[in-house]
Amino acid sequence: MKAIVWHGVGDIRLDDVPDPTIQEPTDAIVRITTSAICGTDLHMIRGTMSGMKPGTVLGHEAIGVLEEVGDAVRGFSPGDRVIVCSTMSCGVCPQCRAGNTAQCDVANPNGPAAGTAFFGGPEQTGPVNGLQAQYARIPWAQHTLIPLPEAVSDEQAILLSDIFPTAWFGAELAGVKRGDTVAVFGAGIVGQLAIASAFRQGAGRVFAVDGIQTRLAQALEQNAEIIDFNAEAPVDVILELTRGAGVDAVIDAVGIDAQRPKSGPAAAQAEEQASEFEEAQQQVAPETNSQGDLWVPGDAPTLVSQWAVESVAKAGRIGIIGVYSPQLTHYPIGAAMNKNLTVKMGNCNHRAVTPPLIDLVAAGLFDPTRFITQQVGVVDAVEAYESFDRREEGWLKTVLEPSA
């Protein structure tokens, strides 16, 4: 079968790989009908998420049709249409029963203290081959798969595999409630859906911070108040627009691949911290393989965490869903403590968060397909990765059709 395979930092290829097989009675095999490229995939290629094993199939977002189920997988049959949760979970351990499915004690083969197991990730997450392929083996299928109702299209469902639940989870982490003023840092696909989630969870006002015009335009269409960090200093603007108080809650949808502002007052401010950013970049990306403007790690890994702490009100709340690698040790903890902030973060508990969102989409109350900007066949996936990596205008969410 065809699959997108990681061979090294800056090196991904469309390869022929063996078809997956059932290895455990808790496994299932899914024929992937739609998968997608996520910003998290770029971390592995840029080198800002270390520990990748060469030969790992990339991707952690997919929907498909069951081809085969293991003897221990109940309630599913070949031919069923399913969402594959990006994070794996057994459904039985104490963490799963508490709803913390991203921290399942069992799914990660590295042991109960190892943390999240997700598809297509580094060795500390399994590793388990990912979903940018024609077929995939799904460990712990009973709890990692979710049946899809007929009312939800493939196009809608692909954003329910990871992106929409992650954004919703970010708003939950930030404790968004009725009447809140919220700042969302990053207006990529997760940021866009975080804006939508914040409004649905009761926010009265949402600021969207980014430096790409098409992203800001889409945020504006959602009635967010936009801030271009290449034209304005985000913290200064947020404080001015909140009469000096700051926002009630922040959602960080950027993480370690943050880019320094290229112009305007924020660029001058960032230049003063150049040595700090360079030290952090060396921590998170000790190995790089940039090729011109391709696969270039973000040059300000700690910038958004700093902006978040500075722009939130005293006793405010921060929810972090942008990826920060385990190697990063920098965080403005002193400033956060001095403001009595609540900071929550983590990988989305997909199996707990996703089912109500499926119902929301099935009922016609929310349609996430407006955020899909590109649809390509798997044979064009490497080229699509390159355009997405360059942060080209108009590239928000790319969906792959592996079966085509």
Image (cartoon, rainbow, N blue to C red):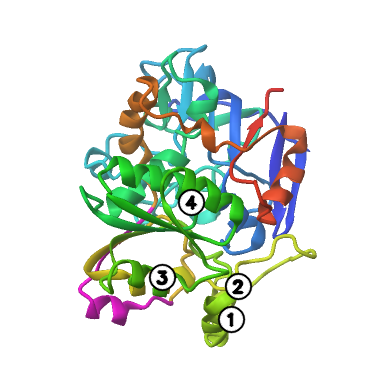
Q: In the figure, is residue 373 to the left or right of 272?
A: right
Contact check, label 1 and label 2, Cβ < 8 Å: yes
Nearer the observer, 187 or 108 = 187
Residue 36 location, x and y as percent? 59, 37
Residue type for callout 4: Thr
Task: Please state which of the two labelled residues, at mark 4 or mark 1, is closer to the viewer.
Answer: 1
Pointer 4 local density, CA inside 10 Å: few below 14, some 14–19, many at least 20: many
Q: Which residues are magenta?
A: 330-346
Label 3 and label 4: CA atoms lie apart by 39 Å
Which tag, 4 or 2, sits closer to the chain's start?
4
Residue pictured at 60% horizontal, 73% vertical: 299
Pointer 3 local density, CA inside 10 Å: few below 14, some 14–19, many at least 20: some
Name the quarter where the C terminus is drawn. top right
Circle 3 residue = 237
SS of the residue at dot 4?
A: helix
Which tag, 3 or 4, sits closer to the chain's start?
4
Label 3 and label 2: CA atoms lie apart by 23 Å
Residue type for callout 2: Asp
**Residue 9 can be seen in this image:** yes
Task: Please state which of the two labelled residues, at mark 3 or mark 1, is closer to the viewer.
Answer: 3
Circle 1 residue = 278
Q: Residue furthest right?
A: 292
Above or below 152: residue 288 = below
Label 4 and label 2: CA atoms lie apart by 25 Å
Contact check, label 3 and label 2, Cβ < 8 Å: no
